[in-house]
Image (cartoon, helix red, strand yellow):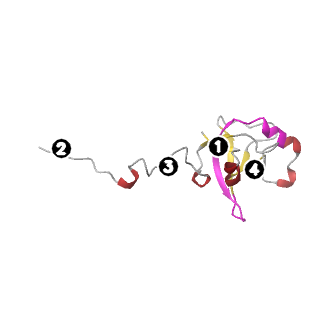
Amino acid sequence: MKKRERPIPFPEYDSTENNIDVQGLQWEDIRPGQRLKLGKPSNRYFEYIYPSLNFSEHRVYSLKELSQFEGTEVLVTSILKMKNGTYYAVLDRMDGTPFSKRIARIYAELEKSFLKNELTVI
């Protein structure tokens, strides 16, 4: 008596060569619920990670404040697409607490923050 083999519903996704490797993850592959890490600021301060999307309210002290969160693990809560075609990730801390008294969540321009290693995959 021959044993039956279990059917594989999507065989093209069963091989490891077609699966996305965590090291090869691109900014286009980032989805809500994913864990990331704040890398090193690319300049004196983070250039592409912001305390808010209202750019007229950015102050030097809030940009300095973001520098202390280098190496913090964050969770992508949503992805925003702007009219000009840029994508922003809304980032919260893993434990759900605000970053500081003034900063509840932060925003990262996905493509540029990945290219400058301000945002990295865990």
In reply to whether residue 79 is colored magenta, the answer given is yes
Q: Viewer-proximal residue, 104 or 9? A: 9
Q: Viewer-proximal residue, 96 or 112? A: 112
Using the rendered image of the protein, determine whether residue 95 is visible from the camera's viewpoint: yes
Which residue carries the number 1 mark?
120
Which mark identifies residue 48?
4
Which residue carries the number 3 mark?
20
Query: What residue type is disc 1 on?
Result: Thr
* Vertical arrangement, residue 53 with respect to residue 95, above or below: below
Cα distance between the residues tagged 4 and 2: 57 Å
Query: What residue type is disc 3 on?
Result: Ile
Q: Position of residue 17 (x, y in %)?
A: 43, 49
Cα distance between the residues tagged 3 and 4: 25 Å
**Residue drawn where x is 75% and y is 50% of the image:** 48
Which residue carries the number 2 mark?
3
Which mark identifies residue 42?
none
Range of the magenta residues?
A: 63-86
Q: Residues at badges 3 and 2 in contact (C-beta under 8 Å)? A: no
Query: What residue type is disc 4 on?
Result: Tyr
**Residue drawn where x is 28% and y is 51% of the image:** 7
Q: Position of residue 118 (x, y in %)?
A: 71, 44
Using the rendered image of the protein, determine whether residue 10 is visible from the camera's viewpoint: no
Q: Position of residue 83 (x, y in %)?
A: 72, 65
Nearer-N-terminus badge (3/2): 2
Category of crowding for the residue at label 4, using alpha-carbon neighbours closer than 10 angstroms: few (below 14), some (14–19), many (at least 20)? many
Q: Viewer-proximal residue, 96 or 83? A: 83
